[in-house]
Image: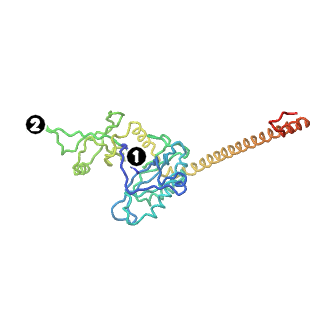
Amino acid sequence: MFFKINRKNEYYLLNNINFPLSEEDQKLTNERFPVGTLIDGELVLSVPKSGSGPKELTYLVFDCIAFHRKLLAKRTFDKRLAYFRGKLYQPYIEALKRRAPNLPPPPFDIKFKNMEFSYGIPVIFQNMKKLRHISDGLIFTSREAPYVFKTDEMILKWKPPSQNTVDFLLSLEFPLVNQDGEEFLDYDAKPICHLKIWMGNERYQLVETMYLTDDEWEQLKSLNEPLDDRIVECYQDEKHRWRYMRFRDDKDNGNHFTIFSKVINSIEDCVTKEELFSACDSIKKHWKIRQKLADDRMRAEHERHRAEKAKWQREQERRHAQLHHSNDAVDPEKRKGEFIDSEQDPKKPKV
């Protein structure tokens, strides 16, 4: 059985999806499907290839944590990806080609998320134009790092200013009006939109307010949904005002204060797309240097193993030669007697 697990740790049984093992792995394990396998990815809405019609669900895979009872989390990123592509994705694609046309389709398409070397930034931006789903930035992942559960400090994210967002808890403060001597809250009037950041556990702290135009407030009211105490994703405009982007009902909490601080720093640093492009040559140069060092270490390790093996073989040959020499040094007459004795019937007394 295959399950989809969301960020709330909720499990959803998936029907009509099969990840068969390769023929080679089936022979080795005597099993048809992988057991104890965990992959990481994101579910996105994609525009159909035709360019029209309802959007399609696509699951983009970008990591493999375990495969067939084998934990891969401590392996390097490139090795984990190689496991997914060779052991899971390729057999899955081949099985799709053989799938009977009368069977119901899978609930969503599964794709391997295309990746480039860190110095291939221009290629990534060029390919972004061809994506059938929305992309809000770049993620730089360490090739040599293990998989990290929860927050991975080795991952570097870049987003354009309009996509540098924070998830807050929205708290609405409506104006108090007095009519005929009675005071009541005017829920039709535009409220003050307080933004609270998550401090951990059940604690939130007021940090900002969200700017709303009159038209934006009318649009939110037209949703006919509760607005207060919801997680809202906001971005900063050119006047450094926090603006509404969307509600995040998929999240139990907003971003933690540490994430909020990092986003603020990112906004203040404001690394532009052009600056990323200009850094590509330097990134490539240092990548090649690291690659050469890694290759040199690998060759040195190979030479060390080869030298140790040769030393072991020489030691075995030396011991064998010493044993042979020791046998040759025995008195020939004694050896002859020993030989004759061995020829005698053990039931008869030796002479």
The residue beneath circle 2 is 182
Of 81 and 324, nearer the camera is: 324
Of 84 and 119, nearer the camera is: 84
Of 70 and 4, nearer the camera is: 70
Q: Amino acid at mark 2?
A: Glu
Question: Residue 106, percent across and down?
Answer: 38, 58
Q: Amino acid at mark 1?
A: Asn
Separation (CA) of disc 1 from disc 2: 44 Å
Above or below, 315 against 278 in this view is above
Of mark 1 and mark 2, the one earlier in the sequence is: 1
Quarter placement of the C terminus: top right
The residue beneath circle 1 is 164
Q: Is residue 184 left or right of residue 29?
A: left
- Residue at image location 32% in from the left, 48% down from the top: 246
Q: Is residue 13 left or right of residue 184?
A: right
Of 273 and 155, nearer the camera is: 155
Dots 1 and 2: beta carbons under 8 Å?
Answer: no
Q: How is the structure coloured here?
A: rainbow
Q: Residues within 10 Å of mark 2 (few under 14, many from 20)?
A: few
Does dot 1 land on a helix, a strand or a loop?
loop
Question: Residue 259, percent across and down?
Answer: 41, 39
- The circle drawn on residue 323 is none
Report the label total. 2
Quadrant of the image occupied by residue 319: top right
Quadrant of the image occupied by residue 230: top left
Question: Residue 194, percent across and down?
Answer: 28, 39
Does dot 2 land on a helix, a strand or a loop?
strand
> What residue occupies the far front of the structure in this picture?
348
> What residue occupies the far right of the structure in this picture?
333
- Residue at image location 55% in from the left, 47% down from the top: 143
Q: Residues within 10 Å of mark 1 (few under 14, many from 20)?
A: many
Question: Residue 153, percent across and down?
Answer: 48, 40
